[in-house]
Image (cartoon, rainbow, N blue to C red):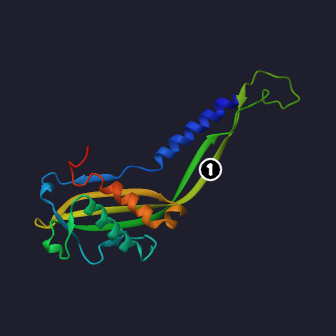
Amino acid sequence: MKKTFLAIVATIAVAIAGCSSNPPVIDYDPSVDFSNYKTFAFISDHPLMRAEGSPPGSPLFEGRLMRITEDILNAKGFRIVANAEEADFAIGYTSGARDKIKVNSYPEPYRPYYGGWGWGAPYYGGGYGGGSNVDVQQYVEGTLAIDIYDVAEHKPAWHGVATKRITDSMLRNPDETITEIVNEILEGFPPGSMAQ
């Protein structure tokens, strides 16, 4: 019985871990010819907008985000230009964070009971019973959206957004965290560069 219970707990833990990191959501305009894109720029000197109601973040976040995005796009063969009006596409960001509460309810380990009459009463074949444990977790959920605009057409062309639980480890390793998230979002850019 103990082995069965441990197997159930392990299965639930793996399932929860698998759900903790959702893949980015991607949307794009299929009328845009992304194969013509060669150069990019940031939409302004400060391309990061913070979502309304979000707590203030590190003033270093925007610079890191721009540098890491530039590195990732350079590795894909795109070249940055200083003037957004001379680029094929321009990049803007939106970030936000909010407090979340997660409530997990799961059964206590099964234990035999004796017909509800107490330990001194005869056994009436009551089987197994148990209550449930409730675990309440408070955490911060962060969202980063990357928007790509077609400069010639002056219209949105591509949108990618990732939402993740912010951990202490992420805050202690911002470059590594931002690189991972931006890579995930831009993995399928431009459309057709990988299986969608």
Locate residue 32, reporting x and y percent: 13, 56
Residue under the point 53% across and 60% down? 139
Quadrant of the image occupied by residue 179: bottom left
Where is residue 4? Give x, y as percent: 64, 29
Residue 104, given in percent of the width and then of the height, sits at 58, 47
For this view, does 49 lie left or right of residue 138?
left
Answer with left or right where residue 174 lies relative to residue 89.
right
Residue at image point 35% right, 52% down? 24
Residue hosting label 1: 135
Mark 1 residue type? Asp
Residue found at x 80% / y 27%: 114
Residue 112 locus on image (x, y percent):
76, 29
On the rendered image, what quadrant is the C terminus found in? top left
Name the quadrant of the N terminus.
top right
Dot 1: element? strand
Looking at this view, is 18 or 112 the one in front? 18
Residue furthest right as drawn = 120
Direction from residue 67 to residue 111 in the image, left or right: right
Few, some or many residues within 10 Å of mark 1 (<14, 14–19, 20+): few
Where 77 falls versus 135 (above or below)? below
In this rendering, the answer to whether 166 lies above or below 131 is below
Residue 79 image-quadrant placement: bottom left
